[in-house]
Every structure is written in structure tokens, then in C-alpha cells.
Image (spheres, rainbow, N blue to C red):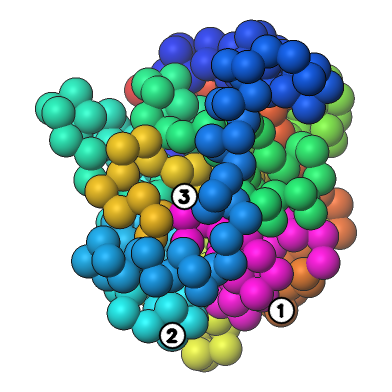
């Protein structure tokens, strides 16, 4: 599950970290030899843990009690396949998965910090919500050495892509005839879908993807979604819940579902289908919690999840890995993809306002 509410401060943080002082400091550390303070800072951030083997960090992690507090939006259908691989690889470490939508996880972490306690070790949630906790100075400005393998648009000074989430359409095959199965989001503007659609009210990415990539025109994207909205879309919170509604036949189709929720359910016999012709791609990012109660355990998980071995576990668990050397096991990537990256996040507030107006959301 994942949420998309983003505060004004999170955008300022993004602009600061990506285009302001921190980015210049971060880059200058690799090009300027002078400056003892900066050199020491970079040395601290890059060693010794960055240079240690995972087995060495594992030994240190065991001394912290053997628990990882994982604030992650990893769906249970995927988590039950992925997290045990980590626990088996590193005996004695158990993952305490704090599972909620990303906006709730961010709000919880912020509330805990303001109350004088830090419980999270690692955050794994939507990039826009990671930037929200970055704004509150709740993460460590550190990247694992494994980050070197990732493309530049999949990492920042304090976050690294853990997986990609594809927003697509899905449907109940008992309720939707084969000839009526949608090939693009615009198909849901047809009046035959009236009263049969569900969606997640926070999925502003659909509007952003259509406006910035498919149409490259805001008004065309807005017009398309206005026609979809005329079919009385019913909104629910939580993408796992949307999937279960479809399984139960409580709706015919979903216009903003997560692709990775469907292959495993289909294998178990659920009457479901999902669209592979077009989709919107978002980044789920990892970040280390500042003052984490189990810092070595946190770094161990961060490094493992960023490694090829960890990314293969994510792929086997039904997720879409961003690591360039790891391919997904399930067919999740649509033929046409509309990516939501840092440039699109800058425009979030503007698109969110239009999205809420179209669907009359509060």
C-alpha cells in the first residue's frame, strides 16, 4: 500500500537537496581536494560500514538485538516472499514490518520524532513521501556502495530506488468480457463503465503521467479524466483493498491499480486481468532513519536490498526491480510507460489540485 499526500515542505526539501546547497556540497566532495571539514564528512559517510562486507555488518547487527524496524509499504502478498529471504540470508535477524500507506508511515515517523523517540530503522515508501521525511531531517545522508550500479535518476544523496511501482488498470474477468477489456486509460471514458469503476483517491500520478508524457498537454489529459470521472468512479484507500474488491466482484474494473498485485493472485486462481499496454511508473525508495535504534541492522538491510541478490529476491517476490542487471520474474512492465521522477514531483501540488477538482475529492 502506498499514499501520495505530500506537504509543501517536502517540495522545498526536494529543491534544496536536488538543486541547492546540499547537492553542490555532495558533488564538490568528489572534485575538491581541499577543505578538511568536508573531507572528514565524506569519510564518515563512506566508511567503515560502506567498505565492510555484508557478513561483517551482520555480526555487528546481531549485537543490536536481531530486530529490524522496517517502515515499508511492501504489500503483504510480496513481503511474505521477500522478507524471509533476507532473514534466511542473515540468521538471527527478524524483520518487524510496520505496514501502512506511505503517507501514514511518514506521518507516524514525524510524530514519533517530535515526541522524542525514533523507532524506524529503514524507510521504504513512495519517493515523494521519502522526501517528506527528508524535509524533517529524519534520514541519514548516506548511500550504500551498491548504489553505484544504479542510474542517476534512481538515486539522490539520501535515497535509493528499491523498486518501481506500475499504476495500471485491472479488472474482474467474470464481469468484463474479453472484447471490453481496456487497452488504454482513455477507454474508461466510455459510458458503459458507469458505476463499475474503482480507484485510489491519492493516485495523482495518473494525471501527471498522461499530462507530461502521453499527451504532453495538460488540458488534453484533464479532458480525458473529466470524461472518466463522469462514470462515477468510486474511491477507496489502499491498493491491496482495491485488488480484493476486484477479486470479490464488488467492482468490474480499477483504473489505478498496482500491477504487482495481480500475477500472484491470478496464479492462485483469482478471475483477474490487468493492462500491459500502458502504465504509469513511480519510484519506491529506501532511506536510512536518522538515530535508528538498530543502525547496523538498518545498513545491512539497505545494502542487501540494493544488491543484485536482494533485487533478485524482490523480482522473485513479484516486484519490478530498478537494478539494471536484474529482470522482473513476472510480466509487469507495460509496452508504454509514463515515468514519474523528480521533475514531475516538483509539479505535484498543481496537479493534485486539478485531480481533486476533477473527481471531487477532499
The residue located at (46%, 26%) in the rendering is 134
Q: Is residue 323 magenta?
A: yes
The residue located at (83%, 22%) in the rendering is 31
Quadrant of image for the N terminus: bottom left
The stretch in magenta equals 299-325
Relative to 270, residue 300 above or below:
above
Q: Is residue 207 left or right of residue 10?
A: right
Give coordinates of residue 51: x percent, y percent: 62, 55
Give coordinates of residue 139: x percent, y percent: 43, 33
- Work out whether residue 336 or residue 196 is closer to the camera in this orientation and state it: 336
Distance Cα–Cα, label 2 vs label 1: 21 Å
Q: In the rendered image, which residue does mark 1 sit on?
A: 329
The residue located at (53%, 52%) in the rendering is 49
- Element assignment for label 3: strand
Give coordinates of residue 350: x percent, y percent: 59, 13
Label 2 CA crowd tier, 10 Å (few <14, some 14–19, many 20+)? few
Relative to 238, residue 136 above or below:
above
Q: Is residue 311 magenta?
A: yes
Question: Where is residue 354, by image quadrant?
Answer: top right
Q: In the rendered image, which residue does mark 2 sit on?
A: 88
State whether the magenta stretch is mostly helix, strand or loop: helix
Q: In the rendered image, which residue does mark 3 sit on?
A: 124
Are the residues at dot 2 and dot 3 in contact (C-beta closer than 8 Å)?
A: no
Label 3 CA crowd tier, 10 Å (few <14, some 14–19, many 20+)? many
Give coordinates of residue 342: x percent, y percent: 69, 28
Disc on the earlier residue, 3 or 1? 3
Label 1 CA crowd tier, 10 Å (few <14, some 14–19, many 20+)? some
Residue 203 visible? The answer is no
Distance Cα–Cα, label 2 vs label 3: 20 Å
Q: Is residue 210 left or right of residue 195?
A: right
Amino acid at each position: 500500500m502506498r499514499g501520495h499526500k505530500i506537504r509543501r515542505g517536502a517540495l522545498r526539501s526536494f529543491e534544496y537537496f536536488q538543486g541547492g546547497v546540499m547537492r553542490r556540497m555532495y558533488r564538490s566532495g568528489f572534485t575538491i581536494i581541499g577543505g578538511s571539514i568536508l573531507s572528514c564528512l565524506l569519510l564518515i559517510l563512506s566508511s567503515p560500514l560502506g567498505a565492510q562486507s555484508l557478513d561483517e555488518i551482520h555480526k555487528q547487527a546481531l549485537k543490536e538485538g536481531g530486530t529490524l524496524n522496517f517502515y515499508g509499504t511492501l504489500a503483504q502478498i510480496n513481503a511474505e516472499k521477500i522478507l524471509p529471504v533476507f532473514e534466511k540470508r542473515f540468521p538471527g535477524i527478524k524483520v518487524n514490518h510496520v505496514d501502512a500507506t506511505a503517507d501514514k508511515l511518514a506521518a507516524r515517523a514525524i510524530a514519533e520524532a517530535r515526541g522524542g523517540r525514533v523507532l524506524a530503522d529503514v524507510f521504504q515508501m513512495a519517493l515523494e513521501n521519502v522526501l517528506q521525511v527528508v524535509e524533517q531531517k529524519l534520514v541519514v545522508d548516506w548511500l550504500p556502495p551498491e548504489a553505484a550500479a544504479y542510474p542517476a535518476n534512481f538515486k539522490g544523496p539520501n535515497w535509493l530506488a528499491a523498486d518501481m511501482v506500475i499504476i495500471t488498470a485491472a479488472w474482474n474477468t467474470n464481469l468484463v468480457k474479453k472484447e471490453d477489456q481496456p487497452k488504454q486509460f482513455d477507454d474508461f471514458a466510455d459510458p458503459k463503465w458507469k458505476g463499475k469503476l474503482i480507484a485510489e483517491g491519492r493516485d495523482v500520478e495518473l494525471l501527471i503521467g498522461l499530462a507530461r508524457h502521453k499527451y504532453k498537454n495538460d488540458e488534453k489529459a484533464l479532458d480525458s479524466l473529466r470524461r472518466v470521472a463522469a462514470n462515477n468512479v468510486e474511491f477507496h484507500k489502499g491498493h491491496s483493498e482495491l485488488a480484493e474488491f476486484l477479486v470479490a466482484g464488488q467492482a468490474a474494473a480499477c483504473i489505478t491499480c498496482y500491477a504487482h498485485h495481480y500475477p500472484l493472485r491470478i496464479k492462485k486462481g483469482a478471475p483477474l486481468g490487468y493492462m500491459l499496454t500502458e502504465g504509469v511508473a513511480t519510484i519506491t525508495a529506501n532511506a536510512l532513519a536518522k538515530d535508528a535504534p538498530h543502525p547496523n541492522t538498518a545498513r545491512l538491510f539497505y545494502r542487501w536490498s540494493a544488491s543484485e541478490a536482494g533485487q533478485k529476491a524482490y523480482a522473485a517476490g513479484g516486484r519490478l526491480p530498478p537494478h539494471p542487471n536484474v529482470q522482473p520474474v513476472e510480466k509487469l512492465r507495460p509496452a508504454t510507460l509514463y515515468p514519474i521522477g523528480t521533475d514531475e514531483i516538483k509539479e505535484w501540488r498543481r496537479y493534485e489540485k486539478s485531480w481533486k477538482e476533477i473527481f471531487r475529492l477532499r
